Amino acid sequence: MEQDLRELYQEVILDHGKHPRNHRHPPDANHEARGYNPLCGDQVTVYLSTDEAGKITDAAFEGHGCAISIASASMMTEILLGKTQAEARQLFDDFHRLCTEADFSLEAAATADKDALDRLQVLAGVREFPVRVKCATLAWHAMASALNGGEDATTE
Amino acid sequence: MTAASTLAEIAAGSNSTLAFDVDRVREDFPILKQEVYGKPLVYLDSGASAQKPQVVIDTMREIQETCYANVHRGAYYFSQHLTERYEGVRETVARFLNAGSESEIVFTRNVTEAINLVAHSFGNRLSAGDEVIITEMEHHANIVPWQLLRERIGITLKVVPVADDGSFRMDAYEAMLGPRTKLVAMTHISNVLGTVLPMKEIIRLAHAAGALVLVDGAQAAVHGKVDVRDLDADFYGFTGHKLYGPTAIGVLYGKAELLKDMPPFMGGGDMIRSVSFEETVYADPPHRFEAGTPPIVEAIGLGAAIDYVQAIGHEAIAAHEAGLLAYATERLQQIEGLTIYGTAKEKAAIVSFALDGIHPHDIGTIIDREGVAIRVGHHCAQPLMERFGLPATARASFGLYNTRAEVDALARALEKVKELFG
């Protein structure tokens, strides 16, 4: 099996893909949005709860998709906890660069939470599979949409 | 050109499978010598678009290198020469479909355009409450144009459900036919399930109810002989690029007496007899439906593709593909956790499947690295995916150049997917 594939489908990703965390619909979520990838039909709905200070107190998702999109959604829900909305958007920005820019390094990231980005590095294997970048970022697009008012996000 | 004549010699006087030599056929398709990630290309996505034989590539190149010009308007040699060749393809297509006349052959971009043409030029004259019947296994190309027609004039769209094994529900269809049924628009072969619909009977029943029938032949024109007069189809569409020909050229067959009374679809040059600002007189069919400069080179390329396929022979191709389908079905069923969707008795060489716990998109990515090209996704048939409760499937679709060894390569690649996912 090729190295590229091994890197794309690391144990962590397969684990999150098969056993996604926070795969539920919290009744008290105050932000939600659906993310849809028309190319493959993958679909996730992201639910966020924020407190008065704007911090994310709960993050969850529902939906179906490939191992990459589900693992990414699962990891995202864990990582967003305790982040402010601005921090969440910043993290998405860095994550997007991580998935698309070959020479992107943690040092170049703007986010304060380098550990979170470090955890997300397992998804950087999509760089070698350009059509799969949309899978890795689907839930993140939905998260940004949810914070912006809940319009559906598509990867187109 | 030599490739086609060689095949013609092999096939001369015989359409038996003995005359079909897949290794020689493969020699005609230069792309099959390509490697992907260092592995031989195993192309199992002909249902999406088929590869092109040398004779098609050469024909299109020859035109552009030696005699290209616009058609229907030149007083000079090249234009007249190419007009003859372009119009000659109409005769080739008419023979291919056993149409009564080449004036029943309208060139379109693809089946999508053929269906939209009928939805406008025929459909716009329907009334609110008139019924159009489709099936649950249609490609979006045979769903959306009717929904647009529904928005325009308020027709009722009825959908014949598909049986669990993917076969056509004749009982449900019969029950749907009624006095308001004006058009039955159905695929001849499902692009997802491979099901071959009993089209002759479908058409007989529609006609008995006073309705016309439009057949989406995108897949069917490739896998077997289509005889529009034997079927008694009113409209029949197929596309060049799935038939080993170029993209951007398709065909709508329409019965002469129907086309004669239909208004144009698009307006422009080439579809008129005379134009003034007060009044325009339209050309007769088929040119009435062909506005603007047509895809000249592509049409002639399609002619070359049809000649190529006919030189090999439908029966030989069908027999070869039936063998591949049987082998692929058997081989894939041996893979634990693999489910095949679409097991109708009458079936073309299209195999949709799912692997337990592994999303089709992941399958596609992993086997691509083994050189195996398949389609993964909803196949432009989302309602059908919904029917089977699937977000997507993986689909291997076979063409005349595929081999049993390639089926084995697919099966081995799928085992690797399972290995990776543990």
Image: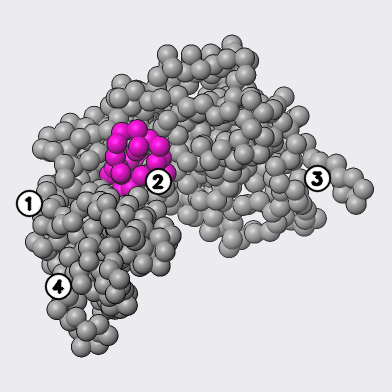
Give the x, y percent position of residue B364: 25, 52
> Which mark is nearer the camera, 4 or 3?
4
Q: CA distance from mark 4 to mark 3?
A: 66 Å
Label 4 crowd (10 A; few <14 / some 14-19 / many >=20): few
Residue at left 38%, top 64%?
A145
Q: Residue furthest top?
A: B208
Q: Residue at 63% x, 24% y: name it.
A: B130
Q: How far is mark 3 from mark 1, CA to CA? A: 64 Å
* Label 1 sits on residue: B422
Q: Are marks 2 and 1 in contact (CB under 8 Å)?
A: no
Question: Is residue A11 in view from this perspective?
Answer: yes
Q: Which residues are magenta?
A: B376-400
Q: Position of residue B64 (x, y in %)?
A: 59, 60
Labels 4 and 3 share a subunit? no
Which of the 4 quarters of the picture holds residue B154? Answer: top right
Q: Identity of the amino acid at label 1?
A: Gly
Q: Mark 3 or mark 1: which is in front?
A: 1
Which SS class for mark 2? loop
Q: Earlier in the sequence, mark 3 or mark 1?
A: 3
